[in-house]
Image (tube, rainbow, N blue to C red):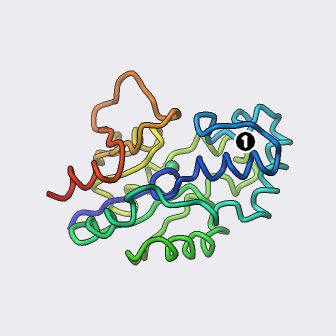
């Protein structure tokens, strides 16, 4: 059975929408989903210190718990789960494991046993450039044959490691003129169902 490593944010969870909504509410920003990015300082147009302060406020509000699932994710995951071993590889920190597992249970009946928390931001020395790190080694460690991720850098790392990469979604932050070899874009879960389960 082949293994698929699946991302959580903006793949299973509609994270950009959720983050933009709570951010506008808490900080009076006027962001749209197209403003979303992993570099929060850039996303908000504020300095690193202010971005860290806002990050702290978001974490106090357990901001990820109100995210909604991406359309079709739960149904397609169930179908994929019959043919593939599914593992999750997220850049979320380990300290939101419980929140994340509860959120998954709320919306997904598929029992995700293996969730790898990459934790790019936990080490203070990485707090500024956590968004530059990639999941390449983690994909190899979980024995992934296929990767589904909305971030081009993670797909590129997968492709470099010889893992088939699916760039998920047609988002403002994952546009590129040309997709590198080994990466294919599927715009939504119904398309993944069509391509991987037939
Ligand atoms: Mg993501």
Q: Residue furthest left?
A: 198
Quarter placement of the C terminus? bottom left
Number of disc labels:
1
Question: Residue drawn at (27%, 65%), measured in percent from left and top?
Answer: 80
Residue at disc 1, secondary structure: loop
Q: Would residue 76 be found to the left or right of residue 101 on screen?
A: left
Eyeballing the image, is 106 above or below 180? below
- Of the pair 189 and 93, the residue shown nearer to us: 189
Whether residue 161 sits left or right of residue 129 in the image: it is left
Q: Position of residue 131 (x, y in %)?
A: 62, 42
Q: Residue at x 70, y 60 (%)?
A: 63
Image x and y of residue 51, in percent:
79, 43
Left or right of 44: which side holds 65? left
**Is the CB of the residue bearing disc 1 within 8 angstroms of ligand 1?**
no
Question: In the image, is residue 31 above or below residue 4?
Answer: above
Mark 1 Cα within 10 Å, few/some/many (few <14, many 20+)?
some
- The x, y position of residue 144, in whole percent, is 32, 58
Picture coordinates of residue 12, whole percent (x, y): 46, 58
Q: Nearer the viewer, residue 58 or 162?
A: 58
Rendered image quadrant of residue 119: bottom right
Q: Quadrant of the N terminus?
A: bottom left
Residue toward you, 125 or 186: 186
Rendered residue at 82%/56% (across/down): 57
Vertical relation: 70 (above or below) 154: below
Q: Residue at x 74, y 36 (%)?
A: 30
For disc 1, the marked residue is 128
């Amino acid at each position: 059975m082949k293994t698929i490593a699946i991302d959580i944010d903006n793949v299973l969870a509609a994270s950009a929408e959720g983050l933009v909504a709570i951010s506008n509410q808490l900080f009076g920003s006027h962001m749209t989903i197209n403003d979303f990015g992993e570099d929060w300082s850039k996303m908000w147009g504020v300095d690193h210190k202010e971005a860290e302060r806002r990050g702290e406020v978001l974490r106090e509000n357990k901001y990820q718990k109100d995210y909604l699932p991406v359309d079709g994710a739960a149904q397609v995951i169930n179908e994929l789960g019959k043919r593939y071993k599914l593992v999750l590889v997220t850049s979320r920190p380990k300290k939101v494991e419980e929140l994340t597992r509860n959120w998954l249970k709320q919306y997904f009946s598929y029992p995700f046993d293996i969730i790898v928390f990459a934790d790019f931001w936990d080490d203070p020395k990485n707090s500024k450039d956590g968004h530059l790190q990639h999941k390449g080694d983690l994909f190899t460690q979980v024995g992934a044959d296929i990767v589904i991720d909305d971030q081009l850098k993670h797909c590129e790392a997968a492709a470099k490691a010889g893992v088939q990469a699916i760039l998920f979604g047609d988002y403002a932050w994952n546009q590129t003129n040309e997709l590198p070899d080994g990466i294919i874009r599927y715009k939504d879960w119904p398309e993944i169902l069509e391509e991987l389960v037939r």
